[in-house]
């Protein structure tokens, strides 16, 4: 009988491989992305001290009010704009992108592209 790892276990292993390659610093923090079936979350993290500097998600009232659905590509793009604006307000303009083990397409790519267009560099 063939046993197969669950999709979430595969993603977690990929994420750990990615995290071993880079981490966020005070000068260049890490933009971490997580997507569930219903929502998307983005955080900008300084790994040297373990602090979240900026965060945004589709659960927040202000963000959710602007969206028709919280789990599509348009919601991801809007979230990218929101996280970039909040980061620029805090003085953060360059980040390291952490796709969280997810494939760089669809929602994850839309969030990254929108954040780049809004002014974040990575």
Image: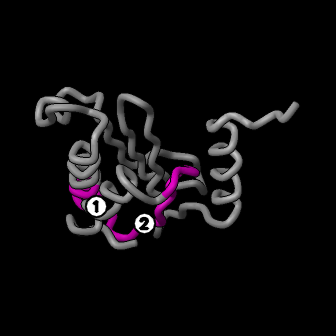
Q: Which residue is mark 1?
A: 115
Q: Residue furthest right?
A: 1
Q: Quadrant of the C terminus?
A: bottom left
Q: CA distance from mark 2 to mark 1?
A: 10 Å
Residue appearing at x 65%, y 57% in the figure: 19
Disc nearer the start of the sequence (2/1):
2
User: Relative to the observer, which residue lies in front, 43 or 72?
Assistant: 72
Left or right: residue 104 versus residue 49 is: left
Q: Secondary structure at mark 1?
A: helix
* Mark number displayed over residue 27: none
Q: Is residue 118 magenta?
A: no
Check the image and report above or below for 14 versus 67: below
Picture coordinates of residue 117, whole percent (x, y):
22, 68
Q: Is residue 100 magenta?
A: yes
Categorize mark 1 by other alpha carbons within 10 Å: few (<14), some (14-19), many (20+): many
**Quadrant of residue 11 in the image?**
top right
* Mark number displayed over residue 95: 2
Magenta region = 84-103
Q: Secondary structure at mark 2?
A: loop
């Amino acid at each position: 009988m063939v046993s197969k790892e669950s999709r979430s276990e595969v993603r977690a292993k990929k994420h750990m491989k990615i995290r071993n390659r880079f981490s966020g610093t005070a000068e260049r923090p890490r933009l971490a992305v997580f997507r569930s079936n219903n929502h998307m979350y983005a955080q900008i993290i300084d790994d040297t001290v373990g602090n979240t500097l900026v965060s945004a998600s589709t659960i927040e009232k202000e963000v959710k009010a602007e969206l028709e659905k919280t789990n599509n590509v348009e919601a991801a793009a809007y979230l990218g704009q929101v996280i970039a604006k909040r980061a620029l307000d805090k003085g953060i303009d360059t980040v390291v992108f952490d796709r969280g083990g997810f494939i760089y397409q669809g929602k994850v790519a839309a969030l990254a592209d929108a954040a780049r267009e809004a002014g974040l560099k990575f």
